[in-house]
Image (spheres, rainbow, N blue to C red):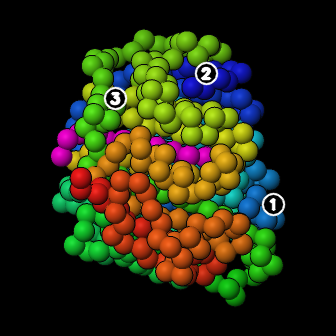
Amino acid sequence: MVSPTSVSICDEHDRIPVHNDENTYTVNHKASATLDSTKAFEGPEKLLEVWFAPDRYNLPRSMARDGLKSVPREMWEDMLGLVHCKVLSFIGTAEMDAYLLSESSMFVFPHKLILKTCGTTTLLAGLPRLLDIACVHTGYPAGMEPWRVFYSRKNFMFPDRQKHPHRSWKDEVKYLDAHFSNGSAYMVGRMNSDHHWYLYSAKRDATSSFKADPVVADGRFEDETLEIIMTGLDQEKAAQFYNDRIVSETTSDCDSASASSDDLDPGHIGGAEITTKCGLANLYPLSRIDSFSFSPCGYSANGVTDAKHNYFTVHVTPELGCSYASFETNVPSSVAGMNSLDVVSYVVGIFGPSQFSVTMFETRATKNSFVNACTERSPPAEIAGYTRIDRIVYELDEYDLVFLAFEKTEA
């Protein structure tokens, strides 16, 4: 699905500069060829967003011009080692680097980093290293807290198998509070339901001497993120995320010279086939999509639209009894000529879940009608074939948060 100008195939120990032109696509050939997901089980991801400024044009003067994008790849790999995941491949653009990981995804912008990991990864264990990299390598002012921080996740399917600091929401909040002085923790949705959602948010103290906040004060700050979390996937639809590929224990050495996309490993080739077959390729037609088919089952994809700073990411664990899929994007729904509910309907149609939840996190300056369409002042949001069981709206600083939960309507 990726049509790059140059493709690099490399051993996992090769280091490739993070300064990429807009058409660079890089594959970690060894990690991709030897990755075995037989023992994968926990689909729900942990999601961390750390913002060091509202946008790339309001970075602190002490920071490198490219901000976090100036960080060499090996530094991110060092941090990801603490999280217990590896880089499989990435798409580099002028605005963003989209990393496809052995356990989900990472997106690096000049002003923020988004890290999403599943399974028993220890995402928050990488947070101190992330903050250190920002200060030491990019010049972010030492001692200054990030501009905004968000951490969220669905309730785990197997919480007893998680590792510190993810054994409980209480432990996670305690860990985050040790790093940020102005945090707030929330639980959204029904505690006795399979779909409730946790959120932690923190913001730099308003008395900070760093003067970037006028961007927010005058209403120019726009941000929106749509996330769909699905469980109980239709088994016929889930079957397309299985394969009979045998994973290699070793892989031959290969150089990092430019090669054609035909030289990709079976995981990336299979991922591209699934992307087309399941219909994901048609959601945002002008996107470049980097996808991977795990063995014996599972699927991950990162998409980058022609806007260069808009992304979407999809992750699937189709095993019967704990099947799960997630979709996340910051692409404005109008880009595809749809509203947000149309996007939800399209994505849900790919997986046919028995239950799913939707969260839309958007600033009030964002010109999106989704929040208005989902408040009690308007008709209920409807998805064909499903019954809405929850609709919750929060006001969080300059953001509005909408949480919806649906169950498949019984015939």
Q: Earlier in the sequence, mark 2 or mark 3?
A: 2
Circle 2 crowding by C-alpha within 10 Å: few under 14, some 14–19, many from 20 = many
Residue at numbered disc 1: 57
> In terms of secondary structure, where does tag 2 sit?
strand
* Residue positioned 49% across, 46% down in the render: 346
Q: Which portion, as a residue range, is magenta?
A: 310-321
Badge 2 vs badge 3, beta-carbon distance below 8 Å: no
Q: Nearer the viewer, residue 375 or 126?
A: 375
How many angstroms separate mark 2 from mark 3 (CA)?
28 Å
The N terminus lies in quadrant:
top right
> Of the residues tagged 3 and 1, which is closer to the observer?
3
Q: Earlier in the sequence, mark 3 or mark 1?
A: 1
Q: Which disc, if any, is residue 8?
A: 2
Q: Position of residue 285 (x, y in %)?
A: 63, 35
How many angstroms separate mark 3 from mark 1 (CA)?
43 Å
Residue at numbered disc 3: 240
Name which residue type carries label 2. Answer: Ser
Name which residue type carries label 1. Answer: Tyr
Q: In the rendered view, would you say 208 is above or below 20?
A: below
Q: Nearer the viewer, residue 57 or 277?
A: 277
Q: Quadrant of residue 250?
A: top left
Q: Position of residue 373 (x, y in %)?
A: 56, 70
Q: Earlier in the sequence, mark 2 or mark 1?
A: 2
How many angstroms separate mark 2 from mark 1 (CA)?
31 Å
Residue 85, visible in the rendered structure: no
